[in-house]
Amino acid sequence: MVKHVCKAIRILLLTCCLLFPAILQAARGTADSSRVTITGKNISLNNVFKSIARQTGYYFVFDNAIIDGNEKVSLRYKNAPWEDVLAYVLKGRNVSWFKTGRRIYLQLAETTKNAPVMNPAPHVTIRGRITDINNQPIPGATVVLTGTGRGMTTNANGEFELFNISPPASLHISSLGYRTVDTILQSVRLHDIRLADAVNTLDATVVIGYGSSSRRLLTGAISRITAEQLEAQPVANALAALQGQAPGVQVTSTSGLPGAQVKLFIRGRNSIAAGNDPLFIIDGVPFDITPLNNTEDLYGAAGRISPFNSINPADIESIDILKDADATAIYGSRGANGVVLITTKKGTPGKAKADLNIRTGIGVTAGDMPMLNIRDYLALRKEAFVNDDIRPSAANAPDLLLWDSTQNTNWFRKLLGGTAPITNAQLNMSGGNSYNNYLVGGHFYKEGTVLPADLGYRRGGFRASFQHQHPEHRLEANFSASFMADRNKSIASDIFNFYALPPNYPLYDSAGMLYWGSAFDNPEAHMRQQAESKTNNLLTNLVLRYRLSPGLTLKTSLGLSDIKMKQFFSFPQSTQHPNNAPTSFIRSAENSRQSFIVEPQADYNLGLGKANLHVLAGGTWQQTTRKGILAIGQGYTNEADMTSLQYADTIIRRPDTYALYRYVSFFTRLTFDWQKKYLLNVSYRRDGSSRFGPGRQFGDFGAVGLAWVFTEEPFLKQLPWLSFGKVRASGGITGNDQITDYQYMRNYGNNASYLGENTLAPLRIADNNYSWEENRKMEAAIELGFLQDKLFFSAAKYCNRSSNQLVGYQLPGITGFTSYQANLPAVVENTGWEFEVRTSNISNTNFQWTTSANISFFNNRLKKFHSLAVSSYANAYVIGQSLNILRGYHFTGVDPLTGLVQFEDLNKDGKLSTLNDFVTIANLDPAYYGGIQNDLSYKNFSLGFFLQFNKQQGVVPAVRPGEFANQLTQSLHRWRQPGDITSISRSTATAGNTAYDQSAKLALSNAVYEDASYLRLKNLFITYTLPAAVLKRLKLQLCRIYLQGQNLVTVTGYKAADPETQILVPALRVITSGIQLTL
Amino acid sequence: MSYRVMCFILCGLLLTISCKQLIKVDSPADEIPAEAIYTDDRLADAAVADLYYQLSDYFPGNILPVLNGMTADELTTLNSSQLKFVNNAIPSEDVQVLSCWRKLYQVIYGANAMLEGITQYNGLSPAKARQLAGEAMFLRAFSYYYLVNCWGEVPLITVTDINQTALAPNARIIAIYQQITRDLSDASLLLSASYVTGEKVRANKWSVLSMLARVYLHQGRWAEAAAAASQVINAGDYTPLISLDSVFLRNSRPAILQLWRPEGYTFIGQFFLPAAATSNFSFYPFTNDFMQEFEPSDKRKSSWTNSFVFAGSLYYNACKYRNRSAAAPGREEYLMMLRIEEQYLIRAEAAAMLNQTSTAIADLNVLRVRAGLPPLSADTMRDSCLVYVEKERRRELFTEWGDRWISLSRTQRLDSVMKALKPGWKKTAALYPIPQEELNRNPNLKQNEGYQ
């Protein structure tokens, strides 16, 4: 979290620099930032401040009511520390100062705050206008007369009036996202009070469901990831950048190929069904992250393609992750798996500026498969045939008899050993005045491939955001739109499994044609099976606000999201194994999803003296339409024609798919705080969804959150070392409706054709008894800030219980189907601890060092399952254990006498059976995971590095020496003769041989699950910012050059390539360098 | 109650009422409710057509003959990943076995749903209802025939209600045969002698009786088997074809029932024919033992087998089906389900069992003469007749649904034949393993002997 602080400051700085060239110019007169020279008589204080600012690069922020800038002083300082100068001029003025980042804040000295009210004086009216540092009015700020409970909120112009006050009035002014100010106002004139942006994360804005709050006032569990954290990482999919960044958020890449899905789970997998995805909301519009290519024949090598690739990471301002009941219950039926709120960048008032950011670099496969070389491989195979007492033949051993015995190919390296060039360019223009502002931007991203083929990923897009607000107008409007198009040129199937090809497998026969003389598929042929997908994504949203009266706002949010994916696969006959289905065919598919949402809301804010009440009520109506078409063109006489359907002999058009989803809800929330000390938050939502059958469509959800900021208590306020302390607790019910549409309808659909006529097949086992899944979440947490929040610590413990889980209840095939939609009669419990520490280790003018770290412990447990033993899950789950366990044989080693692999025969009946001898062999839940971020900056240099770790079990390929496939080098330790003590089987090559059949069971045993924990230097980010003087000469606002690295070093005991993706294409190791220019 | 409260309540009520409207969705345009299916002759017919389509797919109709051929003494393989079938060491996790199993039960589900739907909705014309019920029964029986012969004691499912089916235990073989026989007997009364379409791709009465003859034979009900086979043979619609090259063409003379294939080619054709363009060998050549079964000058050898050289050795492959991909006009091939030649073999075997050797010899000679072989002499003994039945079945019906594998089991000859040929042969290999995935999901289901 220190990182957050540091980065918040940095972004603030950046914003300030960009918006106030005047200040900037004043501030950057000289490169020497710490010492100043000021000499003169009767210089106004304002000029002193300006001079200090010019020479140091810092600037001053203060309320002109506390100090008279025109007052004159005389000083004579040469090359003196600026602190000395400031101390001198402020001496005796009852004003103290502190510096954060490049800003120096002046404020009334602490002691005066409690100064006794002087003699009774005539009562006056105190008026003030509160603005932000850009001189924009801050409406809705709270002004409280210290020690009285009297107070009010500012109007649309940021103005307030307090009548009948005996001066001087001691005021406490606060507003979300700004530093609070304690000030004493004397006169009756209109005071101008400027509030600085909150720079510590306690008061910085946090986005919550349908609103915003600050960490200080939150009753729920929310983690925030800022644009800076995303920018540091050269990733194409923003979700990948979240790995290890926030406690309780588990992110896994499924494959290193471009476009592959990145899985994000919040506080574990609650549901055993597919629906574990959190709810993603981009600027208020739900973004469905279900891949559009959801059927296996549309997967391609990268598998399911994440729609999140269509979101440009650089467009994101912040990602807020909502975890507990208090934060998520406002999303009711869709909050069970947590909610991810994404806020995109908006324009800010100020001079028009252009920001250009270009980076380029390379990606290589991270990790290697240690495979046997040809000599060891052939020796092993020969040994196997000797062991089996079988003569190798052309049919069972072409590698020994037919193939080149000298070719030595490591297929993993040959197929994944390339270098992928990566380029990203981003251009943003923004500007505007205080009433209207804009941001328009475009970006382009290009990623090559590590595969030996002409493949790659390209993406381009633009977005625009306009905001209108006027202090005199009651209507306010925000509009933003983004459009993105990408093209992913890939191959049709994953090639990872070719790592096990024998080292002497020939790609070509003697005639130079692709080789097909064995059961193996030819990897070169796979390179010629194309898969191309093109995605277009349009996201727009419009927010209209109307201020009905002070404190009461009506708002309507409208959103439209339209995503379309076109895919094209070609499988020339010459690239398919002659033994399979050897006609040339292509697949052409188009899937789209269109979503429209309307959310009218009313928002009422009431300050009641010491208390503050905020009431929200609103409704949602959403409609999502999914459409899909798929055509298969078969029989091409010329493979070169396989670019369109038109040359196909036969075109088979699969039935179009179509689904309509409708969703309606009412929600309300009441937030109450008493002196920012006692906080209460109550939310309720009633949802209706078309995914449930008649009579089961509606569900009720809600939560209560409580917090006590105990450092606000008088008896604790004095503690010098404890700057902030809060305990909070929440509990509530959320739900999950991530199931397929229409499951309650007993329908038939087109299946194929017979005699040229369409045939109809039952689509599902329809059962309309299923209803909402319930997830009861409880959480308690403590948050502590020490030494002016230099050390910030938080700990949270949660317990989520989900019951009535919605699953595709698995069925044996004898029922005609393999699953049907039902509620699982089970209770699943997720519990966990999350810890977070952030520290500001060193902070002085030239050198800053901050550290933040988080760790999450997680435990999933099946609490109850009604008649588990006689259900179809009898062999999959065990009460008291995780849902993510695997069952299999218990591998007990290799018999030293025979070299046969052995498994425990639990019931001692002399045979191994899956029913009786299966034990829990692995738990795929991580035991703990987290990350450590360090940010260091020295003058214009900064260095950030991020370590990510995960303690988990993972799957490895089974080692079966002698099998007609290359083996991991572990197979060198195989059993060879009686007496050998080893865990690797004797070599054997023949199905039906006892040794072979036994070792076939390895894949079903704990032998293939091993520790896949890792510690990874996930990210390294080095930047150099050109000094102000140089920038001025170049007429630039900012110029930064940087170097980024991703997945640089991995420390692991895992034996295969990558402990993260395991038996799929490993993640990329990326190194890029770039430049950012702001004009 | 004040006016405002009333107003509020009213608004609230309005909201709830309209809420239901707001989330109302109709059945999507690409789906048809069950009710519509069972009240419309045309739609119900398309639902039954789908069951034939499913049988004609890769699984089970095309791959089952290959798998059964390898487990028996008919085929071997050059595909090392399929050696487990040749070696009769099939792991219970094998996905091909699982796919065949699931597909057959899928057909059974469709048939069960059809039979229930016809009764429940009672919305089809009487003639259509009779026809579709008859076909559903036939298809259910056909599927169970292969299930019981490949896996033995499989669960017997005759309803669609998952509360009754999801945890169904193994059924006794005798009970399964009773169900098959009942279905076929009922279907024979429901179906007419003519085909409902112009082609022989939907079951008629003779299809049902041919199947019934085969099933009686399995149960040792010789007289009934002979009678059923006679009915089909005497119907006169089907005769063995002299021109062996044309037997597997669409609507050929001997075909009683075929499965329609688009483009007139089958996957099974692809399995056995070398892909001249990319390779000149077949992955599933015949065993030497099988090739030696042919008597000299057997036209079936010259017409239905072919040879190729691979890695210096001579191999033979099946070429009953000649089309690998799209067919020449007039040479379209459909997947053969039932043909008249088998009825002669059934009657020959039943007759021999009933000591009616002259009938047996006559029936065998129909096939022998057609194949260019010398007829059996009239004094051939009963036991010799049975030996000839076995040989003729093997030579006539190879690569058709695994007849050899199933017949050897039926005549209890499997063990002795296999022991002589396969060194690692175990008696329990006569049945396939019940797919592991099925056992995992159904705790009441028990694995076959030898696979635990």
Image (cartoon, coloured by chain):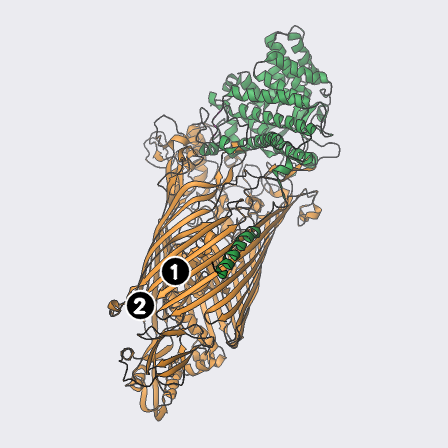
Chain colours: A orange, B green
Q: Is residue A110 left or right of residue B355?
A: left
Q: Is residue A737 above or below residue A241?
A: above
Q: Residue furthest front?
A: B1
Secondary structure category for the residue under label 1? strand
Secondary structure category for the residue under label 2? loop
> Chain under label 1?
A
Q: Is residue A670 left or right of residue B212?
A: left
> Chain under label 2?
A
Q: Is residue A548 left or right of residue A246?
A: right
Q: Is residue B170 magenta?
A: yes
Q: Say whether residue B399 is visible.
A: no
Q: Amino acid at mark 1?
A: Asn
Q: Is residue A441 above or below residue B61?
A: below
Q: Residue furthest top?
A: B379
Residue range highlighted in magenta? B167-171
Q: Nearer the viewer, residue A1077 or A823?
A: A823
User: Residue A200: horizontal and vertical position, in percent?
Assistant: 36, 69
Residue placed under numbered mark 2 in the picture: A790
Label 1 crowd bin: few (<14), some (14–19), many (20+), radius 10 Å: many
| Between discs 2 and 1, the one toward the N terminus | 1
Quarter of the rendering containing residue A7: bottom left
Residue A681 marker: 1
